[in-house]
């Protein structure tokens, strides 16, 4: 690995730069700032939508919790793309695979726990009966 | 190789989105990946393990959500104005951190320090709001020992707050290192890790404010 092609750690959107030539390509910085601003605008809009979804009657009320879940997933996607710069570029393939594995484990832990515990709760003897049996 | 052939070679590698013919392709060819990719990948693995730890706290909270033991429920306790303020602070802080990484790319000490200062102040504002909220809960007798619901709530949200506090200390050391040692490569890699950490904390907060605070304040009859 020659030092010449070492990428720049500070700025990791768009074109990689050769060290010592900050902003070598004209307009790079502007494009990067625009990327962050777009991400911020989308995140703010989705956050506002989440807070709106709590109180509104425009959404079918029993579906409000699902709407909040979907909006949260959308916001996480925006953060991953615009702030963490997870892309489909070849040098990001490992990051995507690790992320997919992480999402799998998170889903197993959360939904697995809920599934098991709801069934346990359902099958449990109510607390007052349990107390009488122990007497 | 003639100059013309060199130009052609450059165009071809450029068209493939590569930096040079010697750079790694990401498909197992072209030699080792640049250090920026390797450092980011290693830290990304750590962040994902952190996310998995948070997922078990989320699972515990979801399971214990209704076990209020006669104490206050989420619906009675949470104040969404406070949550909105915390969310705004952390989102703006994340954006300022992104601006700081662009300033580092430009090697501008002034803008780097300014953006990091804003990042830190917004993070500090978030912590202050959270501590005030927690103190208010404890003052109303809704501390972590009140019920299983409140134990899991304080564990989950408190763990995120502890991460943000640790991040603030890290942020302070990054500002000092940029100031004292300049934009040295190893320090820029540390900063790359810090910015990933800070953005990931914002992602955890998105899950917390949506699924803990907003879903928690829905009327109880709307929840499964």
Image (cartoon, grey):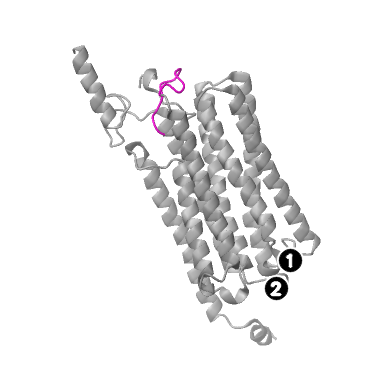
Q: Residue at x 38, y 18 (%)?
A: A4
The stretch in magenta equals: A14-25
Please indicate whether residue B216 sits to the left or right of residue B72 in the image: left
Query: In the picture shown, does residue B50 fall above or below B22?
Result: below
Quadrant of the rendered image containing residue B176: top right
Label 2 SS: loop
Q: Which mark is residue B69?
A: 2
Q: Which residue is mark 1?
A: B146
Camera-side residue: B144 or B102? B102
Label 1 SS: loop
Can residue A122 be seen from the camera position used here?
yes
Magenta residues, dominant SS class: loop
Q: Is residue B9 magenta?
A: no
Estimate the x, y position of residue B145 in percent, counting from the top left.
Answer: 73, 63
CB under 8 Å between callouts 2 and 1?
yes
Q: Is residue A24 magenta?
A: yes
Estimate the x, y position of residue B218 in percent, counting from the top left.
Answer: 61, 69
The mark that comes first in sequence, 2 or 1, is 2
């Amino acid at each position: 690995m020659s030092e010449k092609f070492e990428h720049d750690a500070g700025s990791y959107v768009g074109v990689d730069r050769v060290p010592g030539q900050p902003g070598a390509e004209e307009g790079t910085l502007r494009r990067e700032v625009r990327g962050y601003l777009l991400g911020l605008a989308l995140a703010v809009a989705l956050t506002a939508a989440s807070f709106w979804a709590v109180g509104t009657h425009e959404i079918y009320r029993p579906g409000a919790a699902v709407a909040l879940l979907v909006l949260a997933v959308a916001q996480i996607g925006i953060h991953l793309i615009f702030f963490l710069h997870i892309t489909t570029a070849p040098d990001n393939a490992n990051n995507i695979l690790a992320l997919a594995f992480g999402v799998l484990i998170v889903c197993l832990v959360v939904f697995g726990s809920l599934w098991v515990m709801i069934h346990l709760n359902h099958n449990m003897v109510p607390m007052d009966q349990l107390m009488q049996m122990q007497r | 190789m003639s100059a013309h052939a060199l130009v052609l070679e450059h165009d071809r590698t450029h068209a493939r989105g590569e930096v040079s013919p010697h750079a790694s392709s990401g498909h197992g060819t072209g030699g080792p990946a640049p250090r920026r990719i390797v450092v980011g990948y290693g830290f990304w693995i750590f962040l994902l393990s952190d996310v998995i730890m948070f997922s078990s706290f989320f699972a515990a909270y979801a399971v214990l959500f209704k076990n209020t033991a006669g104490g206050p429920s989420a619906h009675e306790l949470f104040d969404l104005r406070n949550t909105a303020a915390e969310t705004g602070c952390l989102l703006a802080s994340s954006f300022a951190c992104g601006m700081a990484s662009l300033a580092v790319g430009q090697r501008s000490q002034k803008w780097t320090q300014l953006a990091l200062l804003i990042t830190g102040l917004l993070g500090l504002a978030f912590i202050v709001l959270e501590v005030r909220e927690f103190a208010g809960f404890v003052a109303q007798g809704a501390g972590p020992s009140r019920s299983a619901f409140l134990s899991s709530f304080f564990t989950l949200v408190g763990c995120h707050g502890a991460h943000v506090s640790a991040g603030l200390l890290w942020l302070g050391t990054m500002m000092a290192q940029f100031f004292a040692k300049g934009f040295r490569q190893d320090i820029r890699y540390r900063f790359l890790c810090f910015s990933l950490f800070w953005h990931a904390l914002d992602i955890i907060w998105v899950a917390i404010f949506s699924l803990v605070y907003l879903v928690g304040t829905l009327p109880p009859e709307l929840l499964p």
